């Protein structure tokens, strides 16, 4: 079902003649995290809240859940345990899906992100390890090989309770059919250090995969940086004055991309019904001196950008 859903977007893009060997397809943050429910019973998928869904999942696997809970080593042991005991299935489904799509459509894919323990690449494949959980985006070449990992460096306060940060110097920049691509996971786009690394590595395009929880969250007052100190250039007077969407423009990719010298950038947000978590956000695009913010839609969207 996951593969068919992801394929539907690319099939539609191909029918519109939007795909070529130079195409880079960018999926949103956490698109693979929901694979924690892969193979589970309908009561998990149809739960009204994420708490009910995760409770049902844990009760369906009491031994596996308990053993992972005891060894979790995270403040939020429950979520850490769930992602750990489902890790192999999640990595297999995610990897098979995006590798096949890249090969089938002959495109480069920035495969949103997924939460896995100590993820790594082996022989062009994504593999889950046994270390700390990471929120990681994987890039697939047109031949289906996984060639880059971008670990989230600045997890939010909520994520930090079960996800370990990556190292900013490890942020990847790789050659693609349309230029050298740097990949940032959500909040990483809010910190100058990320763009300094991309600048040193020669990024020409910046792709940001994002998820903003909560319906209508972009219209609510911005509460400031979460989980890490705000950079020195952030105006404290903007807190509770700017909306979340306005803060994304000022302090996210649109406002910071010039510092790394990349002329092009795109940010995509996860949308859809995610138990009771909600979602918000729009696609943002930078093309040289011009910036674009797509219309707000409640649901899936395809955005095509010609460089």
Image (spheres, rainbow, N blue to C red):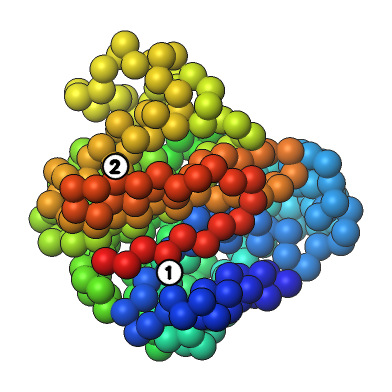
Image point 18% across, 60% down: which residue? 203
* Visible residue check, residue 68: no
Q: Residues within 10 Å of mark 1 (few under 14, many from 20)?
A: many
Q: Image quadrant of residue 3?
A: bottom right
- What percent of the width, then of the height, locates residue 270? 55, 50
Which labelled disc corresponds to residue 246? none
Is 265 on the left-hand or right-hand side of 14?
left
Q: Secondary structure at mark 2?
A: helix
Image point 66% across, 39% down: which residue? 278
- What percent of the width, then of the height, locates residue 65? 74, 52
Q: Quadrant of the C terminus?
A: bottom left
Residue 108 drawn above or below residue 201:
below
Q: Secondary structure at mark 1?
A: strand
Is 231 on the left-hand or right-hand side of 242?
left
Which residue is labeled 1 in the image?
25
Which labelled disc corresponds to residue 254? 2
* Visible residue check, residue 243: yes
């Amino acid at each position: 079902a996951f593969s068919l859903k992801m394929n539907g977007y690319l099939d539609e893009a191909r029918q519109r003649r939007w795909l070529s060997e130079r195409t880079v397809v960018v999926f949103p943050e956490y698109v693979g995290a929901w694979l924690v429910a892969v193979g589970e019973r309908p009561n998990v998928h149809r739960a009204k809240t994420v708490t009910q869904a995760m409770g049902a999942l844990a009760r369906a696997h009491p031994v596996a859940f308990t053993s992972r809970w005891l060894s979790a080593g995270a403040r939020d042991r429950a979520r850490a345990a769930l992602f750990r005991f489902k890790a192999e299935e999640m990595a297999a489904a995610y990897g098979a899906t995006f590798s096949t799509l890249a090969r089938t459509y002959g495109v480069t894919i920035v495969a949103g992100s997924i939460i896995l323990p100590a993820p790594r690449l082996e022989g062009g494949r994504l593999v889950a390890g046994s270390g700390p959980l990471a929120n990681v985006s994987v890039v697939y070449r047109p031949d289906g090989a996984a060639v880059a990992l971008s670990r989230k460096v600045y997890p939010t306060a909520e994520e930090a309770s079960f996800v370990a940060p990556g190292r900013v110097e490890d942020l990847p920049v790789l050659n693609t059919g349309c230029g050298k691509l740097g990949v940032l996971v959500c909040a990483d786009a809010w910190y100058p250090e990320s763009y300094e690394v991309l600048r040193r590595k020669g990024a020409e395009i910046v792709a940001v995969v994002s998820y903003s929880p909560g319906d209508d969250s972009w219209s609510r007052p911005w509460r400031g940086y979460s989980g890490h100190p705000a950079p020195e250039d952030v105006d404290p007077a903007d807190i509770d004055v700017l909306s979340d969407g306005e803060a994304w423009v000022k302090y996210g990719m649109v406002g910071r991309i010039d510092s790394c010298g990349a002329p092009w950038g795109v940010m995509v947000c996860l949308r859809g019904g995610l138990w009771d978590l909600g979602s918000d956000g729009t696609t943002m695009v930078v093309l040289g001196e011009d910036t674009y913010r797509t219309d707000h839609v409640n649901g899936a969207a395809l955005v095509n950008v010609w460089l």
